[in-house]
Amino acid sequence: MKPTEDLGPDSIVDFIADIFERRASDEYLGEPVTIAAHMLQGATLAERAGHDEEIIVGALLHDIGHFTSEFGSFTMDDTEDRHHEDAGAEVLERFFPKVVVDCARYHVAAKRYLCATRPDYLARLSDASVHSLKLQGGPMSQAEIAEFEANPNLRKIVQVRYLDDAGKEPDMETPDFGYFAPMVQRLVDRHCGAG
Ligand SMILES: [Fe+2]
């Protein structure tokens, strides 16, 4: 396993591609898809809907924190429900624009936000997602809502959350990670000033 410190703008995309390949069969607890398929579905749905690359890549990488052991920053004692959104954001923030990082960092918060502000939202959540909502603090309070709405990336964060909820189809065909890799690299280059 390569430690995070060794990764740079020229190697991070290959590194993530390798994770998608090797962890392709990792279960997504309580869902009918693997974690990798779930993220590929979100990105595919985003592209089909004509969303921009920040949203597509945000959806593609939002759950990368479920693979935290790949990055050497967390222990084997961690469970995947232990703030995987923070773990993912921590990995992404060195290489990706803030909007992409925020889509990962706040995808759980976005669920809590939507549960508090859109009465019909709860109905579209999977059973596993409703269950984890309780562990994650339940719907946001008014003060939390106000703070969350101050984020300039709110619209894209919420959009990625909807893609997150939609990308749980048992049999959806998607391209593999390699299809999205050039797009991922473009955002890395933009953030890191290369290319
Ligand atoms: Fe997700």
Image: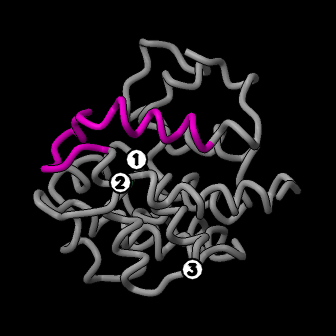
Q: Secondary structure at mark 1?
A: loop
- In primary-sequence order, the first of circles 2 and 1 is 1
Q: Quick one: label 2, few (<14), some, or many (20+) residues within 10 Å?
A: some
Locate residue 110 relative to residue 127 in the image: left or right.
Answer: right
- How far across and how far down the image is residue 165, in percent? 30, 66
In this rendering, the label closer to the viewer, 2 or 1? 2
Start and end of the magenta stretch?
A: 13-35
- In primary-sequence order, the first of circles 3 and 1 is 3
Q: Secondary structure at mark 3?
A: loop
User: Which mark, residue 52?
Assistant: 3
> What is the C-alpha distance between the residues marked 2 and 1?
31 Å
Amino acid of disc 1:
Gln
On-image quarter of the N terminus = top right
Q: Which residue is mark 2?
A: 176
* Residue in view at x 23 percent, y 56 percent: 130
> What is the C-alpha distance between the residues marked 2 and 3?
19 Å
User: Which mark, residue 136?
Assistant: 1
- How far across and how far down the image is residue 184, in percent? 60, 57
* Residue in view at x 44 percent, y 47 percent: 63
Question: Can the viewer see residue 97?
Answer: yes
Q: Is residue 133 magenta?
A: no
- How far across and how far down the image is residue 133, in percent? 32, 52
> What is the C-alpha distance between the residues marked 3 and 1?
29 Å
* Residue in view at x 61 percent, y 21 percent: 73
Q: Quadrant of residue 9?
A: top right
